Image (cartoon, rainbow, N blue to C red):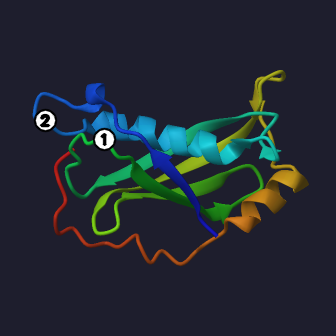
Amino acid sequence: MRHIYRCPLRWADMDAYGHVNNVVFLRYLEEARIDFLFRPEKDFKQGSVVARHEIDYKRQLVHRHHPVDIELWVTEIRAASFTLTYVVKDDDQVYVQASTVIVPFDFEAQRPRRLTAEEREFLREYMDDVDDDVEGDEEGAVAA
């Protein structure tokens, strides 16, 4: 199963070239990740931190008044980390493909921690190792 976040575009997200700035995409991914992880019925109450981002820019995205879709799913679950994979897209265009390694973190003890059984169960619901939308195709890629 995949989580879909409808991400609004803001006028201030554009850079001097008239398209959404590459750095802003990291904020879009953060918004999607927060929407996924911190829901009333399921959330990472003990906290987590980002250990790594990997992002491939495929096409320029220009400001418009309707949101862009961000699909995200879990591609790896380890004892003390998990990986989310994202596609920022419309029905017919992919703008960004990305992944984030997230480490559960105990802020009180100031150290990484293992995933709880409840967190593992939640993440397994979104496990998808078939990356149909994430391809190695470099056609249409834009410089970061």
| Residue 58 picture location, percent across and down | 24, 58
Identity of the residue furthest to the left in this view: 17
Q: Badge 1, how many Cα within 10 Å: few under 14, some, many 20+?
A: few
The kind of residue on which mark 1 rests is: His
Residue at 80%, 40% in the rendered image: 113
**Residue 126 placement, left or right of 99:** right
Residue at 79%, 58% in the rendered image: 122
| Residue 37 picture location, percent across and down | 68, 45
Image vertical order of residue 30 relative to residue 55, above or below: above
Q: Quadrant of the N terminus?
A: bottom right
Instruction: Give the secondary structure at mark 1.
Output: loop
**Residue 97 placement, left or right of 78:** left
Q: Nearer the viewer, mark 1 or mark 2?
A: 1
Q: Quadrant of the C terminus?
A: top left
Residue 18, label in figure: 2
| Residue 2 picture location, percent across and down | 59, 65
Image vertical order of residue 88 relative to residue 24, above or below: below
Please count the marks in the image.
Answer: 2
Q: Earlier in the sequence, mark 1 or mark 2?
A: 2
Residue at 36%, 59% in the rendered image: 89
Q: Badge 2, how many Cα within 10 Å: few under 14, some, many 20+?
A: few
The kind of residue on which mark 2 rests is: Gly
Instruction: Give the secondary structure at mark 2.
Output: loop
Image vertical order of residue 134 relative to residue 119, above or below: below
**Splitting the image into 4 quarters, where does residue 104 fall?**
top right
**Splitting the image into 4 quarters, where does residue 15 fall?**
top left
Between marks 1 and 2, how big is the CA–CA gap?
15 Å
Residue at 58%, 44% in the rendered image: 33
Residue 84, label in figure: none
| Residue 90 picture location, percent across and down | 34, 61
Residue under numbered circle 1: 65
